[in-house]
Amino acid sequence: MNSYSINGFDHCELYVSNAKQAAHYYRTALGFLPIAYSGLETGSRDRVSYVLKQNQVRFILTSPLENNSEIGTHIYTHGDGIKDVSFTVDNAEAAWEESTTRGAESILKPKLLTDDRGEAVVATIKAFGDTTHTFVQRNNYDGVFLPGYTVFEEDVLAEPTGLVHIDHVVGNQSDGEMESVCNFYEKVFGWHRFWSVDDKDITTEFSALRSTVMANDNETIKMPINEPADGLKKSQIQEFIDYYKSAGIQHVAMSTKDIIKTVTKLRKNSVEFLDVPKTYYESLTDRVGEIDEDIAVLKELGILVDKDNNGYMLQIFTKPIQDRPTLFYEIIQRRGSNSFGKGNFKALFESIESEQEKRGNL
């Protein structure tokens, strides 16, 4: 039993080569509003960061301002990608203390941050690869984000696309490493195994994967941990590892209350999604039963559907949002289902394999 509580995902921080341009994409394509800024004007000499928000989803986009920095090295090695997945906690010091006592490597000891809007405490531990987890305690802070950031005051607007909160965050591991990473979350955080599939469940003619979803005690945090399985050709998980150069965050799934409206807006904003074989929809009703949505519309938009004993869910995946075939995003709407689209994995894999073949990486 932990002496602290995790209340949910706080934010994801990406290290990117040009944060200003990335922020423009997140605003105009994905519908995120810039709310906070840290850079030379705020006293930050080594990095610049833009905080973007849509409902409960927050991203920090950070770029280096100096040569030979840790941020620059991360971008050189991995390309643009997620460095940190942070959790909102009620006691950051206790979270850090318990995690490190149980074997986690400390990156940042608990640090008190203050400004005229109050105070917050942050602490960071190492997760897998170069990815970290930051504990954020801000119950005594009423500023826009955290001390050290100023309100983003440029006169810009964003048209929301209906993204509500982070549903889950997926981490890819090298072959044979999934179990040790799951054990890490069990040992360090006391999390449990929520859902899993193996290469007998998730396989195509060419590739396969294994996945275990780790969840915290109140299941506000879910992190699927993937690894490649042997197949005739290279899996999408191995392709990620090859280009990211280590384990890392493969994708973030963001929820919506109306996936048709959300995906329609995103497509209008030129967000690119994976193509789904049209044959996928021929037997959809036989597989998932009756659903409220118009299947013709789902087919036109490329939205996948899966069910479990609690209901069904709808999901779609973007293409990688940078030139390396690494990080992408998932849009998900749950209608009772708590699953992760096991019934969709074959269609998803075949779609990704089509993109891999175009890249010469299958």
Image: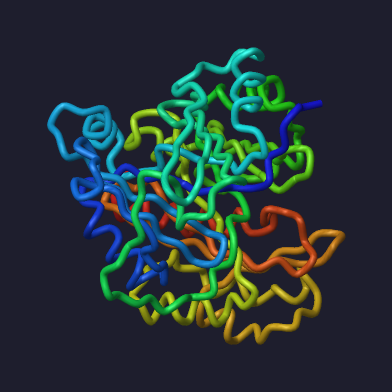
x and y percentages locating residue 356 in the rendered image:
37, 50
- Left or right, residue 257 beside residue 110: right
Most extreme residue toward the front is 116
Residue 30 picture quarter: bottom left
Q: How many marks overall?
A: 0
Residue occupying the point 27% across, 46% down: 16
Residue 75 picture quarter: top left
Looking at the picture, tell me which residue is in the foreground, 357 or 212: 212
Q: Report whether residue 126 is seen.
A: yes
Looking at the picture, tell me which residue is in the foreground, 177 or 48: 48
Residue occupying the point 43% across, 67% down: 273
Colour mode?
rainbow
- Left or right, residue 216 beside residue 323: right
- Left or right, residue 177 beside residue 43: right
Say above or below: 228 vs 317.
above
x and y percentages locating residue 340 in the rendered image:
68, 53
Q: Give the position of the N terminus as an image quadrant.
A: top right
Residue occupying the point 36% across, 57% down: 36
Say above or below: 1 vs 45.
above
Looking at the picture, tell me which residue is in the foreground, 212 or 14: 14
Looking at the picture, tell me which residue is in the foreground, 28 or 7: 7
x and y percentages locating residue 225 in the rendered image:
60, 36
Q: Report whether residue 362 is seen.
A: no
x and y percentages locating residue 350 in the rendered image:
50, 56
Most extreme residue toward the right is 309
Q: Give the position of the C terminus as an image quadrant.
A: top left
Residue occupying the point 52% across, 33% down: 133
Most extreme residue toward the left is 67
